[in-house]
Amino acid sequence: MEITLRLETTTMTSGPGQPPATKHSPWLILGVLCLGFFMILLDTTIVNIAIPDMIDRLGASLDQILWILNAYILVYAVLLITAGRLGDLYGAKRLFILGLIIFTLASAACGLAQNPGQLIAFRVIQGVGGALLTPQTLSVLTVIFPPERRGAAFGIWGAVAGVATITGPTLGGWLVTNWDWRWIFYVNVPVGIIALIMAVIVMPDLRLNRKHQLDWVGTLLITLALFLICYGLIEGQSHDWGAAWGPITIPEIIGAGVIVLAVFLWQQYAQRDREPLVPFRIFADRNFSLMNWVVAAIAFGMLGLFLPLIIYLQSVLGLTALQAGLAVAPMSLVSMVVAPFAGRLSDKTGGKWVLFFGLSLWVVGLSIVVFSAQVNSNRGDLIPGLLVAGLGLGCTFAPLQTIAMRNIQPQVAGAASGMINTTRQLGGVIGSAAVGALLQNQLVTQLTSSAEENATALPAEQQSRFIDAFKDASSGSLEVGAGQSGASLPPNTPQAIVELALKTFHEGFTAAMKSTMVLPLIVLGLAALTVLFVRNNGKAVTPPAPTATGAASPETTRVDS
């Protein structure tokens, strides 16, 4: 098969074993990629801080809020591998720009949504844009940076995650406090426009001279499997884990999702020698396989922390959205500072022990946060744990990517990038759904227990109605907005009963949150142990050099300017 190679001979040549030369500095290209990546991560963290305001202003229930969070993440996760393939086929630059356009327009539409249903629909479109954009960042970084400098690049990439994490709650809190939740989406518009202009000017058109095919059957199977599993987890508590679709029960929906997932894996393995959605050969590298589990666990732990903690800060401690954002800022700030240093250290040591140290510290820090969170706590009580957790989190981004991508051939960089980003988002969506389901379940138990205990202070004829008001949490009508008592109280309720209801909610939610957060701690602990099986002596793979004659092997990188 004849293959053409288009290069600018003055700027696009490269020496043996070196990445293809680009018109602009790789570090400038990294800045553009990080700006787009920043916008995607900002949207995730900024939405969490606005949960209580959305509940109040949109009249959304807790299960609808879970869909507002997870509709985006679910679509995002499902399409990442396909988007990685599209980047290999049509060029990372084109997919990055298309993703920016879709995401920016969808963000504006989210801000205009008039009800939870519209917001969920626009969040789905946001997920499409985010999925098209994200895989292109890692695949481009893997190609344009030499192996010995990728750790530093990944460290900056990881620091951006820290910046987005700190900016999301803080900026979101300021916007929600001074305006309302709509502005957390409007803020994406100027960032998206700036990133789009810079991407058109700076990004190179990197492509591998190899044609890829999309596995549409695999895409449909994995989409259906993930939807069924996540739908069951999110909707389980509101349906009392019983019938959801006519006679079909929640456990049957989840079970069907697991079966479809097994069919997907069999289908992918059966066509492993063709062009599967998941190229199994990348899993021949032990480190890449292990890091896929670890990155999923990290995402699980991250969302497992934010969902209950943000509600706790605003609805129990009574903080404003801005104050809640500032309360969690120390973790993100420390993470942002530490990440570049962890990246350079990973270049020198291989990253195994840096990652193990980081995950271990993160577990310790979150454990301190869980222990410190009490009904009468203040935000200062949480700072020691958040600082330790932030130090650990900053030591995970760069070494994880360095270990995962070290031995990946450039010709499958797009697929590998899509795969690891997919597992990250799958961990996030399953973590959010699982923690949300567990939180709802624990709220039913803990609020009922607290209501039964506190109801003894009421006259006998009012006790049963007081308890029943909190039992309504099992139907998904739990009100957890800022200043809410967790139960729907009739107008003109005596102030003494309102205060007793608030006390009941604070006690019940705090107990439910503390027991719920044990789950992400267990998952993160298992991830830390997994790192012990990493091979730390792998040698990085360098891309083959383009030739000056205009010919190349089928796996040669092409740079169009």
Image (cartoon, rainbow, N blue to C red):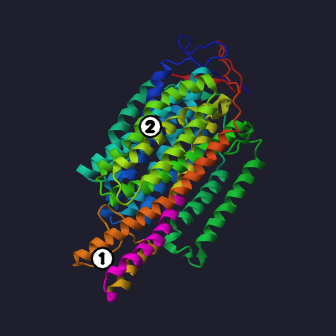
Q: Is residue 180 left or right of residue 145?
A: left
Residue 485 x, y percent position in the rendering: 32, 69
Amino acid type, callout 2: Gly
Q: Quadrant of residue 472?
A: bottom left
- Determine the residue located farthest toward the top in the rendered image: 10
- Is 277 situated above or below 399? below
Residue 72, how many percent across, how many down? 47, 52
Q: Disc 2, disc 1: CB below 8 Å?
A: no
Label of residue 162 in the image: 2
Position of 423 with respect to 443 (left or right) is right
Q: Secondary structure at mark 1?
A: loop
The answer to which of 186 and 166 lies nearer the viewer is 166
From the viewer's side, name the closer residue of 394 and 458.
Answer: 458
Residue at the farthest bottom position: 461
* Amino acid type shown at disc 1: Leu
- Where does label 1 land, which residue? 489
Under circle 2, the secondary element is helix
360 in the magenta segment: no
Q: Is residue 33 visible?
A: no
Q: Nearer the viewer, residue 454 or 105?
A: 454
